[in-house]
Image (cartoon, rainbow, N blue to C red):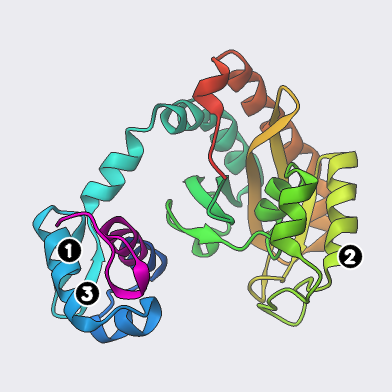
């Protein structure tokens, strides 16, 4: 496909990117009709783009539609910083899951969402886990709030704004000023909480992974909505994040730098 600008002034690279992003964000295959609705691209354009991506193994196709191909996972896994983060984190994540029985997630900031790059299943709550590679909203999850706590003020202003945030449940924090108060508390104590803010019946406690004064990732426990359990597990989560940070501090700064 030649580089250039077509529908809506979008370059070929932009069209490829938006198709891959929407397929990756969906929990099921998407048809051309659904992709047209979500991307705003004509079906004729999507037909060319999608089948070219299938040819290059970036997408897979069956009767249900198009989905992200395994080659995308393979390419992403080759990122040296990501590989180092996952390797350094695994002992702490496994210990935390074994001690708590909950699901442990490791996330980085990616395209204004929390990207889950690793997860470890505990014995008690395996059903609430998300597959690695899933993304979560920043303002409605503990793991996302922990990432937000390290965002520079100008970037935070651009992301949060002044208008009400999207509510996922009746308990989602939608007031920007209240979210900012929570972020200030996270910076002070090193722990973030969410109480059924993204999904009813599920809560979380998280801590940012801070290396040389910057938040590079976050570690979270996800489980049942039990406020006392969340408070009890706050210190183990914070210690796990600190352990990951110590491991990352031994690497070059470039190895743990993540794009926003």
Residue at 43% in and 56% down: 131
Choose mark 1 or mark 2, whichever is in front. 2
Q: 76 or 86, which lies in front?
A: 76
Q: Position of residue 100 (x, y in %)?
A: 66, 46
Q: Which dot marks residue 60?
A: 1
Left or right relative to 161: residue 113: left
Residue at 38% in and 62% down: 21
Question: Compared to 231, does 29 lie above or below?
Answer: below
Choose mark 2 or mark 3, whichever is in front. 3
Left or right relative to 6: residue 214: right
Indicate the quadrant containing the N terminus: top left, top right, bottom left or bottom right. bottom left
Q: Earlier in the sequence, mark 2 or mark 3?
A: 3
Q: Write the start and end of the magenta stretch as one range.
A: 1-19
Quadrant of residue 236 in the image?
top right
Badge 3: few (under 14), some or many (20 or more) residues near its Cα, within 10 Å? Answer: many
Q: 243 or 3, which lies in front?
A: 3
* Residue position for label 2: 177
Choose mark 3 or mark 1, whichever is in front. 3
Q: Position of residue 144 (x, y in %)?
A: 66, 54
* Residue position for label 3: 46
Per the image, label 2 sits on a secondary structure element best described as helix
Indicate the quadrant containing the C terminus: top left, top right, bottom left or bottom right. top right
Residue at 54% in and 15% down: 252
Q: Earlier in the sequence, mark 3 or mark 1?
A: 3
Residue 171 visible from this viewpoint? yes
Q: Earlier in the sequence, mark 1 or mark 2?
A: 1
């Amino acid at each position: 496909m030649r580089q250039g600008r077509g529908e809506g002034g979008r370059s070929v690279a932009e069209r490829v990117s938006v198709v891959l992003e929407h397929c990756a964000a969906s929990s099921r295959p998407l048809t051309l009709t659904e992709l047209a609705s979500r991307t705003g691209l004509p079906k004729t354009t999507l037909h060319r783009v999608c089948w070219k991506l299938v040819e290059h193994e970036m997408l897979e196709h069956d009767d249900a539609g198009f989905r992200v191909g395994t080659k995308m996972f393979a390419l992403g896994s080759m990122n040296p910083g990501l590989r180092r983060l996952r390797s350094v984190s695994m002992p702490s994540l496994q210990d935390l899951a074994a001690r708590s029985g909950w699901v442990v997630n490791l996330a980085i900031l990616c395209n204004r969402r929390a990207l889950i790059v690793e997860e470890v299943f505990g014995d008690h709550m395996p059903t609430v886990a998300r597959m690695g590679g899933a993304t979560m909203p920043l303002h409605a999850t503990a793991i996302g709030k922990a990432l937000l706590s390290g965002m520079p003020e100008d970037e935070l202003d651009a992301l949060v704004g002044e208008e009400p945030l999207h509510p996922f449940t009746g308990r989602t924090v939608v007031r920007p000023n209240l979210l900012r108060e929570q972020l200030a508390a996270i910076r002070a104590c090193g722990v973030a909480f969410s109480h059924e803010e993204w999904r009813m019946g599920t809560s979380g406690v998280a801590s940012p992974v801070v290396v040389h004064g910057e938040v590079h990732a976050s570690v979270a426990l996800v489980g049942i909505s039990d406020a006392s359990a969340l408070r009890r597990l706050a210190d183990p989560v914070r210690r796990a994040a600190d352990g990951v940070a110590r491991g990352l501090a031994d690497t070059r700064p470039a190895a743990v730098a993540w794009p926003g």
